[in-house]
Image (cartoon, rainbow, N blue to C red):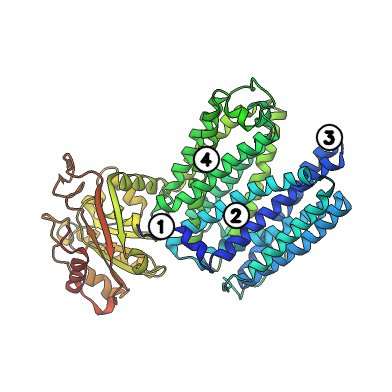
Amino acid sequence: MSGHNQFALLKQRRFLPFFIVQALGAFNDNIYRQAIIGLLFYLGVSSEERTLYTNLAPALFILPYFLFSALAGQIAEKLEKQKLIVITTTMEIVVMSLAAVGFLTQNMPVLLVALFCTGLQSTLFGPVKYSVLPSILKPEELTGGNGLVEMGTSISILTGMIAGGMIFALAGAHGPIVAAVAIIALAMIGNFTARMIPRVDAGAPELKINWNPISESLVVLRLAKKQKAVRNAILGVSWFWFFGTVLTSQLPTYAVVNLGGDEVLYIFALALFSLGTGVGSLLCEKLSGRIVEIGLVPLGAFGMSAFLLDLYFARTGAATAAGLDVAGFIQQPGSWRIIIDLLGIGLFTGFFVVPLFALIQSRTPKSEMSRVFAALNIQNSGFIVLAAVLGLVTQSVLKWSIPQLFLALAIANIVVAIYIFSIVPEFLMRFLSWVMVRTLYRLRVKGVEDNVPDEGAALIVCNHVSYMDALILSAVIPRPARFVMYYRIFNVPVMRWIFKTAKAIPIASPKEDAALMQRAFDEVDAALAEGELVCIFPEGALTKDGEIAAFKSGVEKILARRPVPVVPMALKGMWSSMWSRRDSRLGQMRVPRRFRAHIEVVAGPPVDGAQTDAPQLEILVRKLRGDEA
């Protein structure tokens, strides 16, 4: 694929200041929350009072998500986004100043009020955090950008918890002053950095704000359900928060009871999970080939369950030792299995959630995106509360051990994944095509990112070499495309389900089925009218000798009805690879001549559909392919 990667975004003003602001926000929130717990120990309150505060604090933080997410989504839709980020980071300075007063006076009610206000500030920032990415990133950068954001969030949460927990341990009597100074300083740095973010236009500046939180919450939740794939991607993200909440909330006790460690070992276990999530998030761009590859979601889901199941079997009962530090734990039998399991769970969690965020961003209109993410935040908070409640019920009422809870979560994760993939088979279809293409070929891509339009209708024309051509092109085109293909190829066993799920359009010659041909042309026109990409193979059949055949007039009929831009594209190296007619016949496969063949997809600049014809497009495709069949 292209030599560019997501790390190049960290050198660009359109992304770097935003990345720093969101990472600093997560870092500061967690320093603050852990410093409150540190203050409780510093003050020497009773265990009952400490339990009350530690359970009350998360509830106060998440309550604003229920109350104000719908309002936050509307505000994020109506205002210019850079201005809104500056406003929310200014709020953070005010809130952290109040929190600083709470630390300096050692007043828990003030700290809890400030914590509620922190939740309110996070609620307002939430919709703009993800809705801004499609405005500052190209479609092929969405997966990498989301990977960076998820990595930054995971590492910021972890380091914030560690730093916040160490303030009173290291500063002692000066802990309240250190905590107060730290949270205000971080808020000010975030606000300063926010002013460096370039202007990002409002999604819907004409929107009239509905101040009723209940009715508007229902409105945004309905808005998020308009498109099935987006609706189920939102369900998947909420399940990610449920899964993560159940897992991480058990780690403190798991580290003591089942691993035989202390608080340091809990941080080590959390660090393994967070590190795995960060690495998985970053790998998504490489694995996806810089497109929104939702085929990674099933891979992530089943990987999460596989490693969580192994974690259950790795340690089903209590530890045989106690008081272990990290070094002592590592020396215990079976410790490396647990370490690999925690890393693996995090790794596949990254594979699971990053493509879901990218899918929501790529399939949601910009005028609705902030409100859709507001709906996501409402649903996320509900799933987090549900996870906390179920964790308490299963252990307090049902008396499950933590490994038993992990086992139930692994099974539930498989059930939820199967449910989502059965409702929206596009996820599983993309997974199968992703596995097939990357198993059978080594891909190189040239010009696709620059020449396929980011939005709007376009017709892609390409030479036709093998039965895998449509899958290969779908793996490199950064937007969903509708493929027009010969009905006999469309009906190949197994492949038919993939093509049908991808909304491919079968076509036949007028001699074979005139009605099917006419339906195909009507479907193509309807897809282009809706602003979709449509890909056709104008030769009308697979090449018999590796050479490009004359382009037929069907492409001219399409452009006569709707003269959209045309992107010429060529497949190179496919003739000697699997499933070309050189090595197989339809329905009668022979041993392939080249497994893992090096192939290339090359795209040229778009041409005006009203000013071109089949022979001219054929010449362009021939030039792109060159002599390499």
Query: Pointer 4: residues within 10 angstroms few (<14), some, or many (20+)?
Result: some
| Residue 401 placement: quadrant | top right
Upstream in sequence: badge 2 or badge 3: 3
Res 47 label? 3
Upstream in sequence: badge 3 or badge 1: 3
Query: Pointer 2: residues within 10 angstroms few (<14), some, or many (20+)?
Result: many
Q: CA distance from mark 1 to mark 4?
A: 25 Å
Q: Give me the residue at 74% from left, 57% from top.
A: 183
Residue 250 at least partly seen = no
Mark 3 residue type: Ser
**Of 85 and 105, the residue lying toward us:** 105
User: Which element is circle 1 on?
Assistant: loop
User: Which element is circle 4 on?
Assistant: helix
Q: State whether residue 11 is above or below residue 254.
A: below
Residue 340 at least partly seen = yes
The residue that disc 1 covers is 291
Q: Give me the residue at 21% from left, 75% from top.
A: 613
Mark 4 residue type: Val
Q: Nearer the viewer, mark 1 or mark 4?
A: 1
Upstream in sequence: badge 4 or badge 2: 2
Res 53 label? none
Mark 1 residue type: Ile
User: Which element is circle 3 on?
Assistant: helix
Upstream in sequence: badge 1 or badge 4: 1
The residue that disc 2 covers is 376
Upstream in sequence: badge 1 or badge 2: 1
Q: CA distance from mark 2 to mark 3?
A: 36 Å
The residue that disc 4 covers is 416
Q: CA distance from mark 4 to mark 2?
A: 17 Å
Q: CA distance from mark 4 to mark 3?
A: 38 Å
